[in-house]
Image (cartoon, helix red, strand yellow):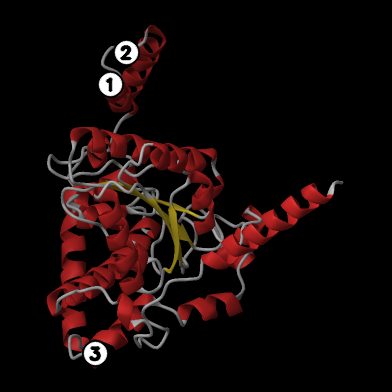
Amino acid sequence: MTTQTTKSIVHSKKQFDGIQKQFETFKILNEEGKVINQEAMPNLSDEQLQELMKRMVYTRILDQRSVSLNRQGRLGFYAPTAGQEASQFALEKEDFILPGYRDVPQIIWHGLPLYQAFLFSRGHFHGNQVPKGVNCLAPQIIIGAQYIQAAGVALGLKKRGTKSVVITYTGDGGASQGDFYEGINFAGAFKAPAIFIVQNNRYAISTPVEKQSAASTIAQKAVAAGIVGVQVDGMDPLAVYAAVRDARERAINGEGPTLIETLTYRYGPHTMSGDDPTRYRTKETDNEWHVKDPLVRFRVFLEEKGLWNEEKENRVIEQAKEEIKEAIQKADQYPKQKVTDLMKNMYEKMPHNLKEQYEIYKTKESK
């Protein structure tokens, strides 16, 4: 090996080490709810701070009720969200959200009626009929596929000359998919106005993030795509808000996309479809992350500012319970979707082989 080659390798190693150190976790609040980064504090009014807390409390209640409804057989597929509320904020009304299956709260806050979110869980086609004026797609079930779609939607927005952006979400497992790399690379190449969020809850379904990639952070994967990468404390709502706000500003100014890794944790199972987190997570790990609960942290912060109290929180809880009750009752009014309904909705002109199957199922359903 030549001396020049050796020098190049040493130089590359130093660059690599520098990248590793570059992605320190961005925080504003510590675990006790104290501000530790005053310079980074977002300029939010008291009303906006209260609204952030309201949404997190409401989303936690929605998760609790959804888990109960699933166990009662009144919901179908459901991916718990408790613990990830701080990294699930939507953007401006004109922006587009391309969610994964754990990101239903974002599109509800963006305007999707709650009863339709319940119908989506049941597999009913009306759950995917997004109302006019609500800029989102239905939750993506294929891991990471929304990243490819987000790049395309963002490029379309750029070509139209709009001042809006696309935000999309996946988990740490999604960051190991080919669609993840293709999406951020394409968006980066065209400086498309996209914000890519990876909610790193440490385990994908059951595989620890350390076994998914040799990279010390997911955020540093932005370097290969030539885009900005940021790692954020995903249990800190102010830090997440500030990071997303800055990413949006860069995007609408033509500076291209941002990859944001939020360090977070799901307190429940991966989904309600038989996953048992006790088989791959320890009590000690669970306890460590429960101390970081975003609701507890932000509650302390607001109480010390005189902006939150038990009475306010109870009002939000009661409002959530009442609205959830009304939404599930409305969802119950829709008849169960039949196999023939699925066939009719999938095709404008049904293929010949499915026409035969359609007649078979139609006969079965009529009995």
Residue name at image x 42 percent, y 84 percent: 31
- Residue 30 % position (x, y): 41, 83
- Residue 197 % position (x, y): 40, 55
Please state which amino acid type lies under the numbered disc 3: Glu
Q: Residue furthest front?
A: 4
Q: Are dots 2 and 1 in contact, CB under 8 Å?
A: yes
Please state which amino acid type lies under the numbered disc 2: Met
Q: Which residue is mark 1?
A: 344
- Residue 356 % position (x, y): 38, 10
Is 187 rendered above or below residue 47? above
Residue name at image x 40 percent, y 59 percent: 71
Based on the displayed image, in which of its 4 quarters is residue 19 positioned? bottom right
Precedes in sequence: disc 3 or disc 2: 3
Q: Which residue is mark 3?
A: 303
Q: In the structure shown, which secondary structural element does the residue marked by tag 3 occupy?
A: helix
Q: Is any atom of residue 195 visible in this view?
A: yes
Please state which amino acid type lies under the numbered disc 1: Lys
The C terminus: image quadrant? top left
Q: Residues within 10 Å of mark 2 (few under 14, many from 20)?
A: some
**Residue 191 bears which disc, if any?**
none
Residue name at image x 57 percent, y 67 percent: 21
Q: Which residue is mark 2?
A: 350
